[in-house]
Image (tube, rainbow, N blue to C red):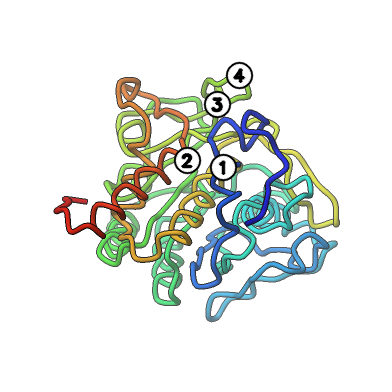
Amino acid sequence: MVTVAAADTAYPLGPVSLPRLMNVTSGRADVVIGLIDGPVSVDHPELVDARFRPAPGSVGACTRGDRSCAHGTFVAGILAARRGFEAPGICPRCTVLVRPIFLETARGSLAMPTATANGLAVAIRDCIDDGAWLLNVSAALLYSDPEGERLLTEALDLAAQRGVIVVVAGGNHRIVGGSALTRHRWVVPVVAYARRGVPLATSTLGRSIAHNGVGAPGEDVVSLSPGGGTVTLSGTSAAAPFVTGAAALLWSEFPMASGASVRLALTRSLSRLSRRATPPLMNAWGAYQALSSLHERRSRGVPVRA
């Protein structure tokens, strides 16, 4: 058992009850996270022990000084950095499948990256075909056309059929709405929450996001920089990997659970009373307790629906 130094109330892990879950497990190598983002500076000192592999046909790694790796390295640090450093390092023993996708508008920008619907569809299928259990998508749709939306919907349908959980950044557009990505019934969209426990003013909100999604820490999150140090970012790109990491830890403890069971535990671990336009903050420990109860009932032969 690995003891996480952060107290249960310490930001950013405390508000979503991750320290207790992180004390149970650091993850398992067979739990594969598809990171659909930018390339990752795998030579960062706090990532040298992490388990990375590139998706087939992709170059997932970059050098430490390459600023085009900024966004992917930041997200990777939340998931897989060595514990005890400044980055969260939620599930360092899981495997991260790196599938670069986004088109950067500025070299080394940490702004939420963008991608086409068709490009996302191909990346999702690539990760599923290469054995991903869950996907982290911290990108907004650059533009959408009917054919691209059809292909994206089909790729998300495939994820649902295979039980591959898809966690996506909900967006930072200050609107009530969504996209073909966040509206899909299987997707778990993530809203960024501020330190004071309310959604960031920039977060995209809406009925599908509220009903299917969760909130996670998204203000002034510290993670890794390709220069070898750390950097701070706010927004849903920073919030999404907290949910992905929690799902990976849950699956590490309950490897026989279905994708639907893990997804349901994450999205229904808090009251739905506040879900008119805003999903509540994730409760990772509550999700663990829900899956533990489900596992116990099944082991006793009690019929369950999930």
Give the amino acid at mark 1. Arg
Q: Would you name the residue on which mark 3 appears?
A: 202
10 Å neighbourhood of mark 3: few (<14), some, or many (≥20)? Answer: some
Q: Do the residues labelled 3 and 1 touch (CB within 8 Å)?
A: no
Q: Earlier in the sequence, mark 3 or mark 4?
A: 4
Query: Of residues 13 and 112, which is closer to you in this image?
Result: 13
* Label 2 element class: helix
Closer to the eye: label 3 or 1: 1
* Three-letter amino acid code of the residue under disc 3: Thr
Q: Please tell me which residue lies in front, 145 or 156.
A: 156
User: In the depicted view, which residue is nearer to us: 132 or 118?
Assistant: 132
* Label 3, label 1: how far apart the Cα atoms are: 30 Å
Tag 4 secondary structure: loop
Sooner in the amino-acid sequence: mark 3 or mark 1: 1
Secondary structure category for the residue under label 3: loop
Disc ID at residue 178: none
Residue 224, above or below 94: above
The answer to which image quadrant residue 286 occupies is top left
Q: Label 2: how many residues lie within 10 Å, few (<14), some (14-19) or many (20+)? A: many
The residue carrying mark 4 is 196
Q: Mark 1 points at which residue?
A: 20
Q: Do the residues labelled 3 and 4 touch (CB within 8 Å)?
A: no
